[in-house]
Image: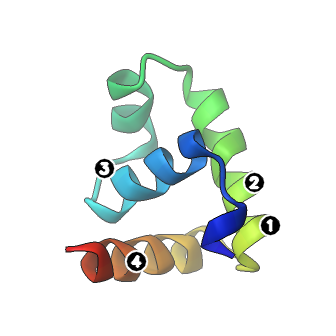
Amino acid sequence: PIETLSNRELEVLQHMGRGMTTAQIAEKLTLSIKTIETYREHLKQKLNVQTGPELLRYAIEWSLDQS
């Protein structure tokens, strides 16, 4: 499923995996919090996870695999 993500979605996932909050990601990427929340929803759909905590766990595990 990672292959289906856009560059921006990958960027959001990467920042999530590093422990950044939605607000921190929004500030770093100079986007609104609402936009980051939309990216998170797209990530949940594309990665087939149901909840925010599941998405966060996925992001952390993926981020560790990239290290």
Q: Position of residue 64 (x, y in %)?
A: 26, 79
Q: Are marks 2 and 4 in contact (CB under 8 Å)?
A: no
Q: Which label was assigned to residue 45?
A: 1
Q: Tell me the mark number nearer the camera, choosing from 2 and 4.
A: 4
Determine the image quadrant of residue 27: top left
Q: Are marks 3 and 2 in contact (CB under 8 Å)?
A: no
For disc 1, the neighbor class at 10 Å (few under 14, some 14 to 19, many from 20) is few
Q: Are marks 3 and 4 in contact (CB under 8 Å)?
A: no
The residue depicted at 45 percent of the width and 42 percent of the height is 22
Earlier along the polypeptide chain: callout 3 or callout 2? Answer: 3
Up-down relation of residue 40 to residue 58 (above or below): above
Determine the image quadrant of residue 47: bottom right
Q: Which quarter of the rendered picture does the C terminus lie within?
A: bottom left
Three-letter code, disc 2: His
| Disc 1/disc 3 C-alpha distance (Å) | 20 Å
| Disc 3/disc 2 C-alpha distance (Å) | 18 Å
Three-letter code, disc 4: Trp
The residue depicted at 53 percent of the width and 75 percent of the height is 53
- Disc 2: which residue: 42
- Disc 3: which residue: 20
